[in-house]
Amino acid sequence: MIVVALICIGLVMVYSSSAMFSLEKYHSTAFFFKRHLFYLLIGAILTVLVMSLDLHLIRRWAKPLFIFSLVLLALVFVPYLGREVGGARRWLKVGIFGFQPSELVKWAAVLFLADILSGRSKKPAGSWSSPFLFALLSVGGACALILLQPDLGSALALGAVSALLFFVAGMRFSYLVSLGLLSLPVLYFSIFSVPYRRRRILAYLNPWAYAKGSGFQLVQSYLALGLGGLWGVGLGQSRQKLFYLPAAQTDFIFSIIGEELGLIGTVSIVVLFMLFLWQGIKISLRSPDSFIQLLSFGIVITVVFSACFHIAVVCGAVPTKGLPLPFISYGGSALIFNMMAVGLLLNSARDRYSQEQKL
């Protein structure tokens, strides 16, 4: 019901935030709304399919799916298959269909890590056993391919979720801290060796000084949130969506929610994601199977981390990075894979309930 509520809010806000832009570019106020409904239908069908499958059968496909996702991730660099947008090659297009392989990699990695880490050997907890090392190298390879696109934000998100799964699976905290310190030079080089990332950092530190350049989005986001006040200006009455705030229906949809529905609307979204976290952790903790525990935890943390990152970006708490708000932002790949992940989570809950009934 929490996810259904978020999806319904998303339907309303995608139409509200995209209608004018859609009319200007495609001569129809419902262009993005119709496409969003289409993606939602595909996601619903695949969610029901995932819920009906045996989790242990899904586990057998964890490694092949992860390898397949890495292959797709590499194919974005192949001419005529990969599509370059804004200087980044993140899209794979076959005919009229296109999607971001990094979205599949994100969820395939969670399934892969749940499989590997739940089946680790009986060595002391936190030791550099082969499952930990194999999982670390595999996820590191995925992050490297994502960085080459380049997409630093997605690589950081995958690394953060993986680190939490390693910790929950038993890796010592000192090892994780060491890995974090070793990755700092790579992070520093990835940020300051690329001019547009340097500009984003400077705009993050003082967006008003770059209000006509790299800080434009953040300034417009501030204005949207500020105009909303407590109750908002009213549904459909946003002014910032009128070609002021770029990517209003995707990367900055939370800003439009803040403007139209005010603090009440934004806090309601935050509360829904907090409830999602609470219910998801309950499913994970009550599962008798370590694979299902790690899988459920990974799904919940990935969704909530994406939501927190999106909200932090539009509020100026972290540097600007395009990341959709789960279940609410317009988008194909992200919406479909997020819904399938929730199908896995519901499947986990049902599997746990079935085992409790047998007991």
Image (spheres, rainbow, N blue to C red):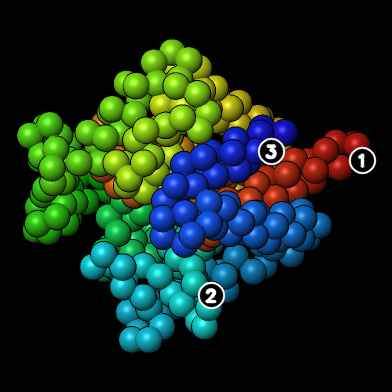
Residue positioned most to the top: 230
Q: Which residue is mark 2?
A: 97
**Rendered-image quadrant of the C terminus:** top right
Indicate left or right for 180 with 334 as reference.
left
From this viewpoint, is residue 338 visible?
yes
**Rendered-image quadrant of the N terminus:** top right
Sequence-wise, which precedes: disc 3 or disc 2?
3
Q: CA distance from mark 1 to mark 3?
A: 30 Å
Indicate left or right for 354 with 343 as reference.
right
Q: Please tell me how crowded label 1 is: few (under 14), some (14-19), or many (20+) other residues with Cα within 10 Å.
A: few
x and y percentages locating residue 172 in the rendered image: 38, 40
Q: Which residue is mark 1?
A: 358
Q: Which residue is mark 3?
A: 4
Which type of secondary structure does the marked residue at label 3 adopt?
helix
Residue in view at x 64 percent, y 69 percent: 61
Q: Is residue 280 above or below residue 97?
A: above
Which type of secondary structure does the marked residue at label 1 adopt?
helix
Which kind of residue does numbered mark 2 sit on? Phe
Which kind of residue does numbered mark 3 sit on? Val
